[in-house]
Amino acid sequence: MIKELQMRVLPRVAYVEENLRKEVALDLGVDESRVNGVVVAKRSIDARQRTVMINLRVVAYVDEPRPDVSPIAHPVDYKPLPANAPQAVVVGMGPGGLFAALRLIELGVRPVVVERGKPVKERMADIARISREGVVDPESNYCFGEGGAGAYSDGKLYTRSKKRGSVDRILNIFHQHGASQDILVDAHPHIGSDKLPRVIEAMRGTILRCGGEVHFGTRVTSLIVENGTVAGVECSTGERFDGHVILATGHSARDVYEMLSRQQIRIEAKGIAVGVRLEHPQRLIDMIQYHSKDGRGKYLPAAEYSFVTQVDGRGVYSFCMCPGGVVVPAASGPGQLVVNGMSASGRNSRWANSGMVVEVHPEDLPGYAPDDALCVMHFQQQLERRCYEAAGCTQRAGAQRMVDFVKGCASVDLPPSSYPAGLQPSRLDVWLPAFIGNRLRKGFRAFGNSARGFLTNDAIVIGVETRTSSPVRIPRDAAAMHHIVVQGLYPCGEGAGYAGGIVSAAIDGERCAEALAATVV
């Protein structure tokens, strides 16, 4: 008998296989010896009450052998391309570009992937130099290189974008390339920045094995436009690659936005969110979220949180929450100071962090001009430069205790932090733009009222967080997915303003690939 069950159990049952098997036997009214295996299909944590419970959907094998192949995994069969397959260019090797390339292979189109940065593991040395020496390589950093910005920012796979494509399909492809089966199970799946690089390498291996091409250190400098249609790209190496183009450059490729502007390819200013990275002791977050002075205990994972409110007509919310994580320097060029967060797969650091950001519309900016498509990008640049200069032109980020920030007073010292480049006390409450800082203060008070202990001077705000999304939208036809004016150009993912995370960017990459393939196959 194969039986599917919905269960609600204590953590010590959900996370211990032997205990779960006993609970299944009890639920089915059979002897435990008859239960040959239990596969967890879905798992979510319910911490709304004092007693934390785990909701499960399981598949139990009673008097039947547990299968060797997971019943919840559904891999894609990628076949080698024929020699005469049509060709397309994919610019960028983040999740949008990777999944676009993989989907093109499925549909019989040879992807030529051009990536300005380095292979994912080679990026690690350049990322380390940012913290150790304060040196930012503009082609290889937390934003640029194989895997994109998501490769070293926890690998969070939770998304609310479920109407545009199959989330389960994306998760299965990640699992097929080496991610843990847990991502198919957990309500808020993540891979971890320590494990994501080998998954990305495996995806590159599939692209190459099937006949695709990958070119590193190859930055696109212009689009080739012939008779109103994009026919390829020219690159910093002097090479030209022909074919329709999926433009999946990520949200920090500012030179690409400037290139599009120079080539008079229509782009639009888009709202973003700006604020700080907020860091607490993880034990405190565990105590708050799990309603226990003992924290998460033996079985529960590091606790997450999510806050959102409205302040003076703009959203204030937590973003990219990293339980058991670290705060990292995420500049993509010299003269910038930007922070982000990441976690390893175990989420076992002493700290929890998240972006705490304020919604910013183009019209909120001083001197806003409706025809200036790059105005939000320029605002980002100015704020990151101000932050860098406030830090003495180093990557030692400015920080302030949370209550001090809310009260508007200086922090004479700072608690320990995960930030590897080092912190220094700074009056973020003074130098952040008032329309951001004032809303953040009110938001922090609201969050402190809803979660006792959250607003504390044991937490610190670190500046500045600006790379929440693209400051530009590259407009496209909603059905055909190509640029609304220029044919053959498929703006894709976060960098085009159509995604907000790894999974949504991956889904968008697949949709762009499907639209392109329909025109050439």
Image: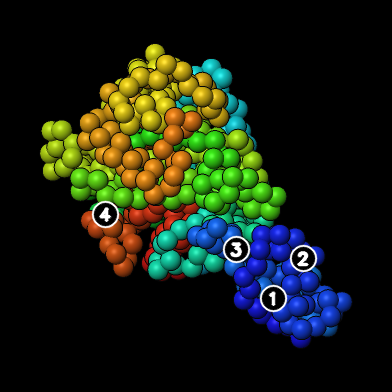
Mark 3 vs mark 1: which is more N-terminal? 3
Q: Secondary structure at mark 1?
A: strand
Q: Amino acid at mark 4?
A: Pro
* Residue 234 horizontal side relative to residue 295, left or right: left
CB of mark 1 within 8 Å of CB of mark 4? no
As measured in the structure, the alpha-carbon distance from the residue carrying label 3 to the one carrying label 2 is 15 Å
The vertical placement of 334 against 375, above or below, is above
Q: Earlier in the sequence, mark 1 or mark 4?
A: 1
Identify the secondary structure beneath mark 2. Answer: helix
57 vs 20, left or right, is left
What residue does disc 2 label? 19
Q: Position of residue 483 (x, y in %)?
A: 28, 56
Dot 3 lies on which element? Answer: strand
What numbered label is drawn on residue 132?
none
Residue at which label 1 appears:
59
Q: Amino acid at mark 3?
A: Met
Between label 2 and label 1, give the one nearer the viewer: 2
Task: Give the residue type at disc 2.
Answer: Asn
Of callouts 2 and 1, which one flags the residue occurring earlier in the amino acid sequence?
2
Q: Is residue 18 above or below residue 315?
A: below
Placement of 128 over or under 318, stated as above or below: above
* Residue shown at 77% from the left, 65% from the top: 19
Q: Which mark is residue 475?
A: 4
CB atoms of marks 4 and 3 within 8 Å:
no
Residue found at the far bottom of this picture:
1
Counting other residues with Cα less than 10 Å from the Cα at mark 3, is it few (<14), some (14-19), or many (20 or more)?
many
Mark 1 or 4, closer to the camera: 1
**Spatial CA span between label 4 and label 3:** 45 Å
**Extreme residue in the top direction:** 392
Q: Residue at x 38, y 30 (%)?
A: 403
- Rounded to the nearest whole Å, what is the CA distance between mark 4 and mark 2? 53 Å
Query: Which residue is more in the foreground, 177 or 265?
Result: 177
